[in-house]
Amino acid sequence: MASGNGSNFEAVVLACRNGQLAAEVALLVVNNPGCGAAGRAGRLGIPCQLHDHRSFSGRGALDQALIASFRAARVELVVMAGWMRIVTPTLIAAFPERLVNIHPSLLPSFRGLDGVGQALAAGVRLAGCTAHLVSEEVDAGRILAQAAVPVLEGDDHAGLSARIQVQEHRILPLAVELAARRLGLL
Ligand code: GAR
């Protein structure tokens, strides 16, 4: 699941293709037409479906469509790789312990929108990213993997985000593997 640029989606695909992750990415679902993630799926040869949230009556209806797509593609584990919508208990219940999210902060600090901006505003010297299982409370599920990234003197949002993303691309495939192992899928 992706909403934007799709660099984390691509990192998971590449981890599968280089043998780091014994898995296959069966499907990408995006909610924004023409987003970078959809372009990457095209280049990588991964099937991509658009479920534009604007064409659904609400969060529940969108999540029902997602569940139908995942079931049709025989998906065993779902990754929210920059999915910028809040998911409902319906989706979480359909994939119990099988829904992994990547968030750009060292949780439990700086949940919700713009984890990088929140870290800069708070003046912390250590930022980072967290891959975790999704629970009903936003950004509060069981932590699978984290990486710390120092905030440098004069860092701006773009610079810090870029360094955090390098670490996201490293820990997200690792977290997928850990989640799959917990479930006995690997
Ligand atoms: C990532 O940095 C991810 O942590 C963040 O969106 C970015 C997506 O980048 N996710 C959230 O903020 C979720 N609350 P990408 O599209 O290049 O993978």
Image (cartoon, rainbow, N blue to C red):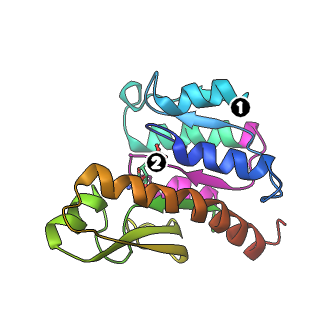
Q: Residues within 10 Å of mark 1 (few under 14, many from 20)?
A: some
Image vertical order of residue 57 relative to residue 157, above or below: above
> What residue is drawn where x is 43% and y is 37%?
4
To which residue does mark 1 refer? 46
Q: Position of residue 102 (x, y in %)?
A: 49, 60
- For residue 22, what is the image quadrant? bottom right
Residue 93: image quadrant is bottom right
**Residue pointed to by mark 2:** 82
Q: CA distance from mark 2 to mark 1?
A: 17 Å
- Please name the amino acid that badge 2 sits on: Gly
Q: Tell me: 146 left or right of 122.
A: right
Q: Residue at x 82, y 72 (%)?
A: 184
Which residue corresponds to the image point at 78% horizontal and 58% vertical from the top-left? 21
Q: What SS does tag 1 mark?
A: loop
Q: Which residues are magenta?
A: 71-95
- Indicate whether residue 89 is drawn in magenta: yes
